Amino acid sequence: MTVDVTTDVLVVGSGAAGMYAAVSAARNGADTVLVDKSLIGRGGATIMAQMTVAAAVGEQEPDHWTHHLQDTLESGRGLCNEELAAILCEEAPLRIRELDEWKIGWAREDGHMKQVMAPGHGRERCVYVDFLNTGPAVARTLRTQIGRAGNLRRASELTITSIVVNDGQVAGAVGLNMETGAAVTIQAKAVVLAAGGLTRLYQRNSASVNMGGDAYALALRAGAELIDMEFVQFFPIGHLAPRLVGMDPIMWDPFRYKLGGRLLNSEGDEFVQNYGHAETSNKYTAPRDVASFAILQEVAAGRGSPAGGAYLSFEHIPEADLRAAFGPVIDRLAANDIDLTKRGIEVSPIAHYHMGGVRVDGHMETGVPGLFAAGEAVGGANGANRLSGNALSEAFVFGERAGRFAAEAIGNRVGSWSNEAARSAIDEIMAGRHVATRQSGPGLASMLVTLQKIMWQDVGLLRTANGLANARALVQNMRWDIGDYPGASDHRFALSMQEWFDLRNSLIAAEAIIASAQTRTESRGAHQRGDFPRTDVDQTHNLITRLDGEGLSVMEAPLVSKPFNLIPLEAAE
Amino acid sequence: MTERLARLKIQRGGPGEAPAYDDFEVPYREGMSVLDALIWIRTNKDSSLAIRYSCTNANTCKECMVRVDEKTVYACTKRLGTTPVLVGPLTNKRLLRDLVTDIVPPREKLSLLLGEPNSEE
Ligand SMILES: Cc1cc2nc3c(=O)[nH]c(=O)nc-3n(C[C@H](O)[C@H](O)[C@H](O)COP(=O)(O)OP(=O)(O)OC[C@H]3O[C@@H](n4cnc5c(N)ncnc54)[C@H](O)[C@@H]3O)c2cc1C
Ligand code: FES
């Protein structure tokens, strides 16, 4: 068979990282194709991001990227890949200024970009677009650039199911045509994996449907390695109840930060201070992991809210102050029957971001020649705990680099497509197409719900050897149960088939988290072990996960360190 | 105590087929959206129901537009009550299946990348 599409660089996923990579590959001379399983620019985390982007542009007050780096490394609890973290911090200002030229509309004040404080940053460093509009503005701006690029084609509704590797290097990819259920073959000299994160694996999450861990499974199955998969970041006060529609579940944070909302248990008492962090009544200072842990412990002790979280109360704040701080949001809350002057809302930790991910070098290339990665899919830069605002910077910076170095790499490479190498990937789609259409009854969606419960219960905020072993056995059984190809098909809008590929990926990504979490017998950053509550200096190394056949293996790797000199801020001005 | 139920009549089928309607009962939760109910149906009753959505809560992806009682709405922000509703696909877009229509912008269509004849109506 002949391939359906031929290109130099294929970019998988069109969030901030993928769109930036595509623009960058194209402007560096490569014929580029950008695809997404959802609609271009809309399917992932990027368009949902509401808050801020960290970059030492130094417009609000003197700043230098080495100070941003220092804060990033500190937050990462000793595990950051210092080369990647330095790249992130040094190049973030370039990308912020480029987006400014592309008219993203960063908030301004007295003629300069407005930068605000965010937890963990030593200075006013975070830019944003009003009002809670950063992500949509990013998506719109990059989509415009995509539309302007010459040698760049793009397609929605193509779910990449396998990266094709031939003779030890990338040859392209195979995907599922969502509209028809058919297999699509794409020959490419380089592939950039920018398929986003995995927080949908958890019962309580801030994810879109397309954040089930595809990038990690695609990389592993192509022979690439993952790094530090045990570090999933939980956001302490995600919205839990009452049902709030049309608003992001992480929306409470800036308001709590601004106004000092109180966290209360079912007895109406503040409790965070009982877990080793003195939080005075109206200040919100406990680090994310402490607040999350405290809420879970209260729930476990029978003092949780009815839905299984804690109350966040603003009842002590005068109505006028609430109105001033919440702005138009207060009316959207009213439409949800939420009156903050009358009662608290219920909050809970929710899975929010993944620090671990595909292992790459400074060129964003994996160990498989021609396979690059960018964005949240990449692991290492943020170590054991990410600083707020670093995720979008990472998506811009790594996306730009992945596209640029992919375009460079194709110069000395000929396309190495072979039908043989793509055969099994094509066959599993074809096999799925031939099973009966329209099976009613619960399907794979209910298996995903089961997986989400397992991950929440045993692989969430507090882990133990028993819980992890239990979870791993269940996940391995599910990997076995789903079989080798989709068990239901639908030839127009192939959602059932896509769901099978999604679930296969989610199960592999889940097992990778579990395997890594089993190996790290200490507590550090986002990885907390009930049976090993302390940090162990002897485990100050990274953990690398590989797929050998069907089985996952984990091994230690030394840190990537890169000494730097903190530039004094007077000199930097 | 009997459980409160939300009732949905959902249009099924593909282009060129006479629309069929399936009735579903869904456990009612205070404040739930039409999308919550559609997800519940796919998870618990009928996984062959085709729907399109991404962001689920934030109302930013704008992928979930359907018609509820003949009005175009976002499924993720349209509240459900306990009176029955009729849910159908957008009528001004090409129907793919059930509640899913072709809302992909012209220059982002996979058929264009594949060099297929334009499938626009
Ligand atoms: C609610 C929320 C709020 C946030 N707020 C902030 C913030 O204020 N500041 C900050 O810095 N960070 C924030 N983050 C984190 C940040 O938004 C993400 O880390 C970042 O946007 C990731 O960008 P990305 O391009 O790597 O992935 P995404 O934007 O998630 O894009 C990945 C894309 O890949 C596609 N895809 C997945 N699998 C496949 C496949 N198999 N085939 C084809 N396509 C595929 C998806 O459909 C999606 O479009 C937030 C995250 C969330 C969820
Ligand atoms: S699901 Fe995203 S807008 Fe409705």
Image (cartoon, coloured by chain):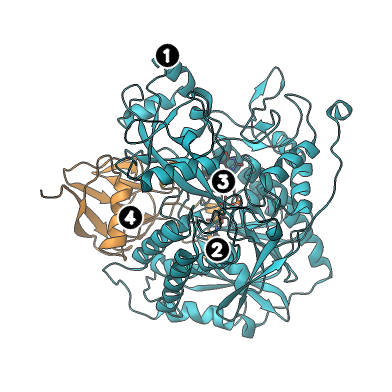
Mark 3 beta carbon near ligand 1 (under 8 Å): yes
Q: Secondary structure at mark 3?
A: helix
Compare residues A56 and B74 and report the one nearer the observer: A56
Task: Identify by letter the chain in orange.
Answer: B
Q: Secondary structure at mark 4?
A: helix
Q: Is residue A550 visible?
A: yes
Q: Check disc 3 and give the amino acid type.
A: Thr
Task: Identify by letter the chain in cyan.
Answer: A
Query: What whole-number distance in Å separates the C-alpha atoms at marks 4 and 1?
Result: 39 Å
**Residue A534: x and y, percent?**
60, 53
Which mark is drawn over residue B39?
4
Query: What whole-number distance in Å separates the C-alpha atoms at marks 2 and 3?
Result: 23 Å
| Side of A489 where B81 appears, left or right | left
Q: Chain of mark 1?
A: A
Q: Secondary structure at mark 1?
A: helix
**Residue A383: x and y, percent?**
67, 52
Q: Check disc 4 and give the amino acid type.
A: Ile
- Residue identified by numbered label 2: A513
- Residue identified by numbered label 3: A46
Tell me, yes or no, whether dots 4 and 1 are on the same chain: no
Q: Residue at x 38, y 76 (%)?
A: A487
Q: Check disc 2 and give the amino acid type.
A: Ile
- Residue identified by numbered label 1: A320
Image quadrant, ligand 2: top left
Q: Residue at x 65, y 32 (%)?
A: A127
Compare residues A528 and A210 and report the one nearer the observer: A528
